Amino acid sequence: MRALASHPLATRANTDIVRWPYGWYVVGRADDVPKRAVRSVSIAGRECVFYRTESGALHAMDGHCPHMGAHLRHGAVVGEHLRCALHGYLIDELGKVRGTGSGCPRARKWHIAERFGLAFVYFGSDEPPALPAPDEADQFAWTTGKAVPIDADWRCMATNAFDMPHLCTIHHRELVAPIDTGVSDGRVWLRYVSRVTGGSLSDRFMKWVARDRIRVRMSCFGTVILAETDLGFTRTAAVLGMLPDKNGLRAFGAFGIRPGRGLRLRLWLTRCLFTAFLRRDFKVVEGMVLRMDDRDPGLRALFDHLRSLPGVRA
């Protein structure tokens, strides 16, 4: 894949929307961090490691040991501590290095949380807000999909989620009611009602199960997008986390549905249908140079919200 620098955003996007907004970032699937595992991630050029202790607790802290700077991704979990590979010192969950005396500073602890089968790390200078979550999320059963590398900037993917005209050309959906937008609880949201016009297998199935009316609310928290659908007889939801990297981004997805009979099959179908819908976007956004079209009301609401987000621009 090409490096991100080969498809830079337009100048206006670079100055108006931060590259690294403060907020929660999905850094992986929770199941991909088993006991005693250590993983690393870079957010806005700041190295972070996250690891799971013997008891199953998940912790995150600065990526370099505060003693002499060895990268902690080479470390190992010992009980409830992280051991630096260079000198073998143990670091507790608060970042304190054991055995070096009182002069050694602590490693900065990062906020980390698990929900929907995903691992979230908070990047920011203040106390973290609530995790991005669909309404009544605790009433859903959840499954996750494997990470998908996408050769695009996260701002292009966020724009894609709010771009109503592309529903027809890419997703074979037709709007049947005016859209509604708003901002609340740290998110910008868009509601719409559509019908299926496509003829693929997934399109025909959605047309049948939804009785040709799909009510959708899209929400953007920055690098986390929520999609909530009302099919009449049931509701589904998807959480899409976009983690920027040197090649574009990695997308992590969690998919939920109300519990009931045949839950495993319905979870599998929910994941497949959401994935089939999303994959249509993944290819067309590759190499996209974002230019903002404020004439569309959904995009105008999104851009106004994204411009207001604090964070790191570089």
Image: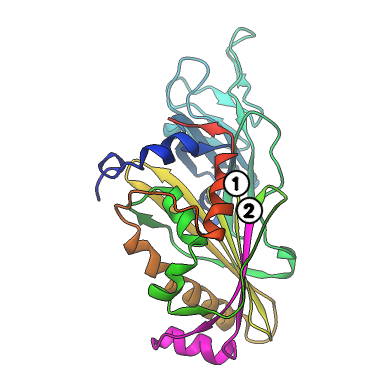
* Residue in view at x 31 percent, y 56 percent: 286
* Near-viewer residue (54 or 104): 104
**Range of residues picked out in magenta:** 188-217
Which type of secondary structure does the marked residue at label 1 adopt? Answer: helix
> Is label 1 in contact with label 2 (beta carbons under 8 Å)?
yes
Q: Mark 1 = which residue?
A: 305
Ranked by sequence position, the earlier of labels 1 and 2 is 2
Give the residue type at disc 1: His
Q: Position of residue 106 (x, y in %)?
A: 61, 19
User: How far is the residue under mark 1 from the one under mark 2?
Assistant: 6 Å
Q: Is residue 305 above or below residue 145?
A: above
Q: Mark 2 = which residue?
A: 188
Determine if the magenta segment contains residue 227. Answer: no
Q: Position of residue 109 (x, y in %)?
A: 62, 29
* Residue in view at x 68 percent, y 62 percent: 134
Give the residue type at disc 2: Val
Residue 285 shows in the view:
yes
Q: Position of residue 103 (x, y in %)?
A: 61, 7
* Residue in view at x 36 percent, y 55 percent: 149
* Residue in view at x 46 percent, y 19 percent: 87
